[in-house]
Amino acid sequence: MLLTCDPHDKEGGMKLIEDLTTNADQFQQQILNEIVTQNADTEYLAGFLDGHSDKEMFKKKVPIVNYDDIKPYIERIANGDPSSIISNQPISELLTSSGTSGGQPKMMPTTAEDLDRKTFLYNLLVPVMNKYVDGLDQGKGMYLLFIKPEINTPSGLTARPVLTSYYKSSNFRKRPFNKFNIYTSPDDTILCSDGKQSMYCQLLCGLIQRDEVLRVGAVFASAFLRAIKFLEDHWKELCSNIRLGIVSDWITDSNCRRAVMDILRHPNSQLANLIESECIENSWEGIIKRLWPRTKYVEVIVTGSMAQYIPMLEFYSGGLPLVSTMYASSECYFGINLKPLSKPSDVSYTLLPNMAYFEFLPVEKNHGEVNQSVQCNGNSDNFSKDEEEPVDLANVKVGQYYELVVTTLTGLYRYRVGDILMVTGFYNNAPQFRFIHRRNVVLSIDTDKTNEDDLLNAITQAKSHLESLGCILTEYTSSPDTSSIPGHYVLFWELKMIGSGDISDLNTAVMEECCKTVEESLDYVYRRCRSKDKSIGPLEIRVVKHGTFDALMDFCVSQGSSVNQYKTPRCIKCDETMNILDERVVGRYFSRKDPFWKPYTMET
Ligand code: AMP
């Protein structure tokens, strides 16, 4: 089921949305039927369905799975087995997810046809945005978009992140040059594999065309803030380039240079002076509106873990609406926000019933304790999976929490995405969901997703260094620090001296070694963000004085946590609990070296 949408046709687009949402269940049944009949003969499904190809058998026999269950099939394809082991359509490439398995990125199968499905969703966003914001055809979007490294699998398939795959596809590069998708960034600057050159050139082009910019953005809030930081560090050089009409020598990518020169064309000291006069101000409050005065909104995802960046975005944007348009993943693009101007805390996504077959595993909050423990524990898992059966899209209940399970047209069957969603209401017959959190994830600064086990493992590796200091680790927790850009992980460690000695006077080199070992032990995506993308800053360990974790427990219990069931929260996000820890810090240590990272290969 492949639908098309003409982004120019506002009425047609809105009609499509009405149709998809009114007939959500019919679309879902149809897509399931299509997937099962077309793929019943694949090795994977045949193993469960034994020749049957009806929906009922599918739900009865095909298990709900995690990545580790399907990993052997994905690896076989990467190593040269035919796509038909999981899909009747050829697997065209593998999409490396920011989720990891055994420290390496998960790889999701995709097909050529799926690019058109993604394009459909992107096109559908246009009429929705035009419904709420007028005049978007009167200017350009300054979207800062980037590609990431890719590899070839032994079978010759390309494995790369989903957005890299999309930006490199002809669907993106040959998109119709229509008035709603004119960007300030030439494609060559987006497709430049050197992240620093790409960022510099995109900002330069955005500044030169400042009078035409009507909207700005990046995919995630973290990437947009990184661009602002980059601008803070490079505005003098950017202004000098504009003043002289030349591009800095260190921009060596010839396609980038050519694309920027096409826009820069001649020296423009007036524009350089104008930009300089804004950037030189002490405060950068409202800098977006000052540099790009016609901007109507900032398009970045600020739901989920990205919500931590809202205050900083509000500061820089000067109160412009923050718009989260879509909810998507490497597995599948899920849905769109039908009310793009709603407050970040009110954003709900409507899953489009033609993208995949969706099921929902009900999850319960634990023992009614959730309110307080959510506040104390950040987003650690306060949800437990019931033994209940999954429900269909049309049968979810308002107010209930679910884990999303997808069956795609690209070879995933009843796959647990790991996202916990809450139903906020219905649009026609299609439920709308608030993104609550990703299962188990405790820390996330950029696209990294560190869960409790990853954290425990990394800390276990690092704490062996403490022996030389004559102390042991008695308790720990963590917190993302996003007060500066890039953000970084903070670990709070309570230590106990075995013999004599003072925890406020620890050997700095040993503690820095602990920071380094934690970083080296975290997964591939963390290390890439930290060492290559520089989107995460050096990890910090804050040593707290004896009794700090008792004080933390006392506080949580005073707020309603049960003493019997109290577990030290492994991530702290609320201000009150942070204060309890921060007031008791006796030493702060930072990682001094980037952790080892090299592009993922199938052998590593
Ligand atoms: P990846 O597999 O690396 O593409 O990451 C996909 C994941 O990013 C999703 O499963 C979500 O956990 C998260 N994500 C994607 N879009 C959103 C969104 N709009 N709001 C919150 N989280 C999101």
Image (cartoon, rainbow, N blue to C red):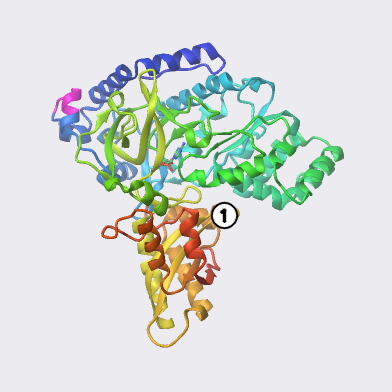
**Relative to 244, is 180 above or below?**
above
Asked which quadrant contains residue 3, the reply is top left
Question: Which of the two residues, 122 or 401, is positioned nearer the viewer here?
Answer: 401
Picture coordinates of residue 88 (x, y %)?
29, 28
**Relative to 141, is 580 above or below?**
below
Q: Residue furthest bottom?
A: 500
The residue located at (25%, 45%) in the rendering is 69
Determine if residue 304 is in view. yes
Picture coordinates of residue 209 (x, y %)?
74, 33
The residue located at (44%, 82%) in the rendering is 469
**Relative to 431, is 443 above or below?**
below
Question: Which of the two residues, 90 or 441, is positioned nearer the viewer here?
Answer: 441
Picture mark count: 1
Picture coordinates of residue 322 (x, y %)?
58, 35
Picture coordinates of residue 443 (x, y %)?
44, 53
In the rendered structure, which amino acid carries the disc numbered 1? Lys
Question: Which of the two residues, 274 or 427, is positioned nearer the viewer here?
Answer: 427
Segment tinted magenta in the rendering: 51-58
Quadrant of the drawing holding the N terminus: top left
State the residue position of label 1: 534
Quadrant of the drawing holding the C terminus: bottom left
Indicate the secondary structure of the residue bearing disc 1.
loop
State which image quarter holds ligand 1: top left
